[in-house]
């Protein structure tokens, strides 16, 4: 079974630039999550999708972050414009259904200079 | 709001000795509890979960965890540590029922010395 795929693995941008991350979940997994993991901290949920609908985006900074999951499969997370404090690893995860264990991708390490 | 505390930033143990990584939580209702492990340059891997039933749950790689409702704890244990167990361990909780967003602890680095 293929795992959660993410790209790119690394990205370096300057502040005020925009960036996009892509995630392809495990086939058949209805629930998809984006997390932000700042160095030395645990992952923090940014947004949760159930199929192509948003379940929870309460911690997503909506003035600069956006995410979509068209067709209920893969997903993109965008930051525009980026700030220095957005430097982090962005993790995508998927689960068969809400409440079941989540499977994580390798993450995208973003550095904003 | 739910929260998770992992009181130890790092745990050091000798190979072959038992290990415990501590976790306490705060959540309304009956919790769903998880342990994940993160190896360098790799994503988080699921170890085990507690939803209901037996308070002692067994997971991958010989790890187990004990749910203690009165102490609101979910400590991770292993009878005999291996050097290859050295990694970053995260405890996570979500409230049972309804929408179940996970809240993670800050992580505990386990160092197993040969």
Image: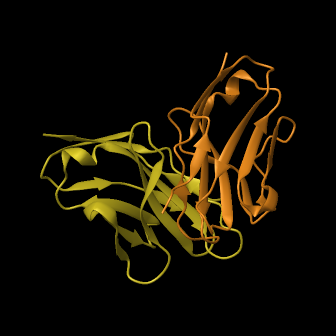
Instruction: Tell me: A18 left or right of B55.
Output: right
What chain is colored yellow?
B
For the C terminus of chain B, the image quarter is top left
At horizontal 25% and vertical 64% (from top left) the residue drawn is B62
- Which corner quadrant of the image does residue B97 belong to? bottom right
At horizontal 85% and vertical 42% (from top left) the residue drawn is A62
Q: How many marks?
A: 0
For the N terminus of chain B, the image quarter is bottom right
Q: Position of residue B104 (x, y in %)?
A: 54, 52
Residue A109, relative to residue B5: is it above or below? above
Q: Position of residue B58 (x, y in %)?
A: 32, 71
Q: Residue furthest bottom?
A: B53
Q: Nearer the viewer, residue B70 or B9?
A: B9
Q: Nearer the viewer, residue A56 or A4?
A: A4
At horizontal 28% and vertical 43% (from top left) the residue drawn is B86
Give the color of chain A as drawn: orange
């Amino acid at each position: 079974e293929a795992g959660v795929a993410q790209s790119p693995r690394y990205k370096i941008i300057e502040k005020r630039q925009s960036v996009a991350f892509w995630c392809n979940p495990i086939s058949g997994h209805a629930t998809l999550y984006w997390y932000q993991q700042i160095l030395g901290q645990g992952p923090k949920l940014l947004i949760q999708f159930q199929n192509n609908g948003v379940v929870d985006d309460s911690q997503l900074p909506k003035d600069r972050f956006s995410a979509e999951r068209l067709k209920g499969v893969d997903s993109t997370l965008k930051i525009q414009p980026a700030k220095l404090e957005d430097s982090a690893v962005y993790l995508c995860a998927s689960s068969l259904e809400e409440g079941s264990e989540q499977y994580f991708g390798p993450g995208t390490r973003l550095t904003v200079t | 709001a739910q929260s998770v505390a992992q009181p130890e930033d790092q745990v050091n143990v000798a190979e072959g000795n038992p290990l415990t990584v501590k976790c306490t939580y705060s959540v309304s209702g009956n919790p769903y509890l998880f342990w994940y492990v993160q190896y360098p340059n790799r994503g988080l891997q699921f170890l085990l979960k507690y939803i209901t039933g037996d308070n002692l749950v067994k997971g991958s790689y010989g790890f187990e965890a004990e749910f203690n409702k009165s102490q609101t704890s979910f400590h991770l244990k292993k009878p005999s540590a291996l050097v290859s167990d050295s990694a970053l361990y995260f405890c996570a909780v979500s409230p049972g029922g309804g929408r179940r967003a996970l809240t993670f602890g800050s992580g505990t680095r386990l160092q197993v010395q040969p």
